[in-house]
Amino acid sequence: MDEASSLDAVRQAWANYSAAVRRALEWDDQARRRQGRDFLARAPEVQRLRVLSVSERINGLNERHLRGETDRSMRSVNDFRERVLALTAVTVLLGLILATLVVRHILKLEADRSVRYRDLLHAQEELHELSAELVKAQEAERRSIARDLHDQVGQSLGALLMDLGRALNEVKDNERARALLAAAKDGAERTVNEVRNIGLLLRPSMLDDLGLAPAIHWQAREVSRRTGLRVDVDAGELPDTLPDEHRTCVFRIVQEALNNAARHANASLVQIAVRQLSDAVMVVVRDNGVGFDPEYMRGMGIVGMEERVRHLGGVFGLQSEPGKGTVLKVELPLSDFSARES
């Protein structure tokens, strides 16, 4: 019996029981005495037992329905749990795959970056070596040109001066010829001086013959003579054993710093200090010019000085502010040079 028929049976039993009770309530006194005992003994109890029986069947059906619903609910929960677990597993798997791909891509990018960085370092090293070779070639060319100017052009101009002097002595009565020869002699003397100055600027012979300190003092006097700039030099006692590369580097740095102070800084005073320590050579050039911002204004002269210092393994420092002058500090180690020589 299903739930609907059980409910109909309960309704029918209850209707019969109610009808019997209503009929009993309608009896008169004689009918109550005659039929009441039998009614009370059989009809209500039978109807009650019938209702209880049907109710028990309904309760059984309800319990089976509840267990069925509970089982369906548990199956639904289990299905949902399995789907969540499956979705979680798929998500984790996809995440691992994506993480693996990302890590592999990052490692590849890192490897490419390392290769490019090594290539960049190698290119910078080659550039520094090329720059150093260029500086050496320039110095050698300057030395050769200065020697040629002194030995060939200077001697030729000197011979020309001697010939002009003899010709001037021979022409005594011709004033016009003497004037022309005197003008030619003056021009030749100026040319000799200019050639000598060009040769000294290219490579002062005193740097090779007398040493670094006399060359710096001469450069300071020449700049003061040409520009009126006051230059104070404190070179101390620089030994003759200073390596040629270091002497050339220090001289070129001082030369470039003086030219910058005279041309661009509008300075009135430049102070130069050169000291040889136990393991390094220190150079400090200070001026009272207009100054500048080194972060945004770095000419080729400054770049050239920095390249020379870096080639010798030194430290290049430049401090300047607009309106506060400029301080150039250079430290050239001697131990690195000794190690390279050995």
Image (tube, helix red, strand yellow):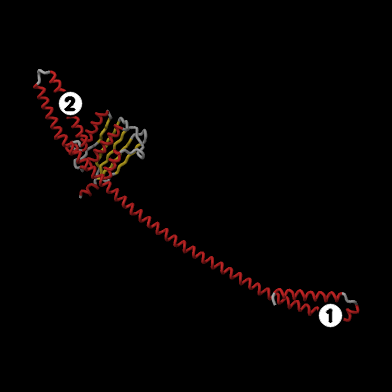
Q: Measured from the top left, where is residue 6 in percent x and y? A: 72, 75
- Say above or below: 48 vs 158: below
Q: Residues within 10 Å of mark 2 (few under 14, many from 20)?
A: few
Q: Residue furthest left?
A: 170
Badge 1 is on which residue? 39
The structure residue drawn at horizontal position 54% and vertical position 65%, both measured from the top left corner, is: 84
Q: Measured from the top left, where is residue 316 in percent x and y? A: 30, 42
The structure residue drawn at horizontal position 37% and vertical position 55%, both measured from the top left corner, is: 110
Q: Relative to residue 94, is residue 73 drawn left or right?
A: right
Q: Relative to residue 319, is residue 191 drawn left or right?
A: left
For residue 85, which numbered disc appears in the image? none
Badge 2 marks a residue whose secondary structure is helix
* Camera sees residue 139: yes
Q: Measured from the top left, where is residue 121 in percent x and y? A: 31, 50
Badge 1 marks a residue whose secondary structure is helix
Q: CA distance from mark 1 to mark 2?
A: 166 Å
CB-based contact (under 8 Å), mark 1 and mark 2:
no
- The quadrant holding residue 107 is bottom left
Quarter of the image for the N terminus: give it.
bottom right
- Say above or below: 74 vs 113: below
For residue 187, which numbered disc appears in the image? 2
Front-most of 321 and 186?
186
- The quadrant holding residue 13 is bottom right
Amino acid found under the numbered disc labelled 1: Phe
Amino acid found under the numbered disc labelled 2: Gly
Front-most of 308 and 80?
80
Q: Of marks 1 and 2, which one's residue comes earlier in the chain?
A: 1
Q: Residues within 10 Å of mark 1 (few under 14, many from 20)?
A: some
Q: Measured from the top left, where is residue 14 in percent x and y? A: 78, 74
- Say above or below: 197 vs 246: above
